[in-house]
Amino acid sequence: MASQHGTPPVFSNKLVAWIDHRLPIFSYIEKEYHTFPMPRNVNYFWNFGAIATILLVLMIATGVVLATNYTAHVDFAFQSVERIDRDVAQGWLIRDLHMNGASFFFIAVYIHMFRGLYYGSYKAPRELLWILGVVILLLLMATAFMGYVLPWGQMSFWGATVITNLFSAIPVVGPSIVEWLWGGFAVENPTLNRFFALHYLLPFVIVGVVALHVVALHQHGSNNPLGIDPKGPQDTVPFHPYLTMKDGFGVMVFLLVFCAFVFFAPDYLGHPDNYVKADPLVTPPHIVPEWYFLPFYAILRAVPDKLGGVIAMFAAIAVLFILPWLDTSRVKSCTFRPIYKWFVFVLLIDCVILGFCGANPAEGFWVPLSQVATAYYFFHFLILLPVLGKIERPLPLPHSIADAVLKKKAG
Amino acid sequence: MRKLILASAVALAALAPVAGHAAGGDSIFPMPPVKWSFSGPFGTYDRAAAQRGFQVFKEVCTACHSLSLVAYRNLTELGLTENQVKAIAAEYQVPDLNDEGQPIERPARLSDRFKKPFANDAAAAAANQGKAPPDLSLIVKARAGGADYTYALLVGYADYAKLSAEDKAKLDKQVQKASGDPKAKFEVTKDENFNKYFPGYKISMAAPLAADKVTYVDGTKATLEQLSADVTHFLAWASEPKLEDRKRTGVRVLLFLLVLTGLMYAVKRQVWADKH
C-alpha cells in the first residue's frame, strides 16, 4: 500500500544511504511512518494507539529509574518507596508519574479498545491485530497487578493474597499452584522478589507484542470511522505530517489531563491503605483492587461459587479473543448499524456499573446488581452480537471515503 | 473536537467508580469545618502553624507515637535554623555502637530519624493495651479524608452519655445493621473512648489534646481547635514534605503544556487545512 505514495526513497545523505543499503531502517521509517497511507477520515479516537505507546515508553523509563532506588525485600520495600518520595532528588515526581501512569495507561487502552469495538476494527482482515491487542491487555494487567504489590502497603499485600488465592479454586492442583506462585506458604519475601523480577520483565514482553501489533496494523492499514477500505490515494493521507501532527495534538491534550492528576491529585486514584505498611495480621475492612480491575473484580464476586467466579472473570477476557467471530455483521462501523450502535453504549454503561459494583462491598443491592451486569456482559458478546448481525439492516455504505468526506464538507 | 470531548467524557466515566472510596469519612456527624493553607493548586505549608504543630507533637504525641520516616534534619524545612534543630536533636539519646563495638547511647544528630518512644513494636503494644500505636509519618495520607479527618478525630472526642437521644438511636441503628441483630445497642466500655469520627466511633486512644495542654512559645492561645489544627498541619507536612515542590512544578508543567497544546493545535489545523 505504501507504494501509492511514490517510489522507494533515495537518501541524499551518503552515510544514511550507506547504512540503508545494508540495514534498511531508514527505508522502513520512511515507508511505515512517513508515506504510510492513513484513511483521511480517522477521528481523534485514533490517537489512543500513539498515546498508549508513549505511556509504555514513559512507564519503562520511570520504572527503570525507580528500580535503581527500590529494595525488593519485605522489611525494606515500604521504606525504600518512601525514601524515593522524600530523599531521592525528584523521586516524588518519578514515582507519581509511574503510579498515575499505570492508571492512565489503562484509560488509554480502554478507550483504544472501545474505539475498536465501536468501529468494528477487529473484523477481517484485522482479527490477529485485535487478538494481539487482547494479549497486550492481559500482559498489562499482569504487570500492573505485580507492580501494585511492590510498595508493600496493606492493599499491595492483601490484593496479592486475594488474587493469588483465586488459583486455589482450581480442583486438585489448585493449592499446589498457589504455593508455587508464592514460593512458600503465604505471600512473603519470595513472592515480592519474583513479582519484582516479573514486573521488570513483562514490560519488555509487551514491547515485543506491541511491535507485532504494529506489524499486523501496517499490513492492511488502519480502519476508519466509515469502516470501508480506502480505494485509492484520494481516500488517504500520508502518515507524516498529517497523523504525526494530529497524534501530537492528541498526546498533548492527554498529557494535560495526566499531569493535572500527577501534580495536583497524585493519590486520588490510589487507596489510602497503601500508605500503611503491609501487616499480615491486620486485614483491611474492604480489600479493593485498583480501579482498572474493578469490573473484573465485580464479575469474580458476582458468581456465588469460587471456581465459578474465577472462570467467569477469565471468561470475561477470553470472550474478547473470539470477538471477531462472534460478530456476524458484514458491516464494520457502528455508524451504519442503527441498532447495534446503541448496544455498544449499553455495554459501556454495563462496564461502568460493574466498576461501581467492584468498588463497593459485596452486600445489599450490589450483589444482584453485579449479577445482572455480569449476565448482561456475557449476553452482549455471546448472544446479542451473533444474533443482531443476522437480523439488523445496516444503512447503505458510502461509495468511498473521499465521497463521504467531500459530501460532509458540502453539506 | 467534538469527538475529543466525547473521549474525555468516556475517560471521566471510567474514573467515576473510584470516587466512592476516595471520599473521606462516612460518620453520622457532620465534619467540623477547617481550611488548610496547603490545599488548592497553589497551596503551601504555613511554617508558623507547622512549627507550633511540631511543639504539640514533641510534647504530647511522641510519648506514644513514632515518626520513623522523618529525620531531625528535615525540621529545617519548617523554617527552624540548623542550630535550633541540632539543639532539639541533642535532647534525645539514641542507641549506637562505640568504636569498640559496645552498645552505647549518644545524643541524636541531624541525620538521625526521630527517636521512637518504645524500643520495639512488642514493647509499644505491651504498654498500650496490646496494640502498638501507629507510626504517624504517613498518617494523613494513610486515612481516607486526609488532614480533614485527622483534625476531626482530634476534636471529635465527646461524652457518649451526653449525646442527644436522636444521635444515640442512629448509632444503635448502625450497630444493628452491621451485626444483623435488631436489638443490638451501641456501647462504650471503660477501655474505649467515644469519638465522633473514628470508624466505629470507639477508639482506644484517650483524648490526647485539651485546651492549654501545651503552652505555645509564640504566645498563640492553645484552644483544642488550635492545637488540633496545628498538629495536623505538622503531620500533613510529615506525610508529604515535597508537596510544595509538587504543586510549584505542576503549575509550570501545566502552563508549558497548555502553550504547547495550543501550538500543536495550530500546526495540526494548518497541516490539515486542505484535507477537510
Image (spheres, rainbow, N blue to C red):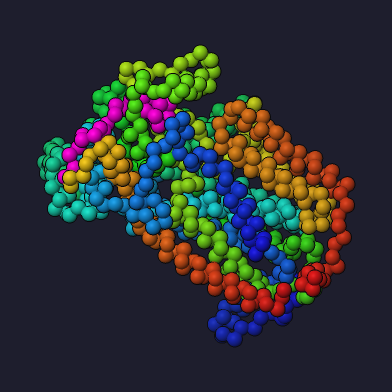
Q: Residue at x 80, y 70 (%)?
A: A411
Q: Position of residue A100 (x, y in %)?
A: 49, 52
Q: Residue at x 76, y 49 (%)?
A: A342
The magenta segment:
B193-217
Depicted B247 relative to depicted A383: above or below: below
Residue A379: quarter of image: top right
Is B95 left or right of B240, judged from the image as shown?
A: left
Q: Position of residue A292 (x, y in %)?
A: 57, 45
Of residue B103 and residue B196, the one placed in the foreground of this image is B196
> Looking at the magenta stretch, what is its main secondary structure?
loop
Of residue B244 and residue A180, the one placed in the foreground of this image is B244
Magenta includes A120? Answer: no
Depicted B241 relative to depicted A76: above or below: below
Is B47 left or right of A50, judged from the image as shown?
A: left
Residue A386: quarter of image: top right
Q: Residue at x 46, y 68 (%)?
A: B256
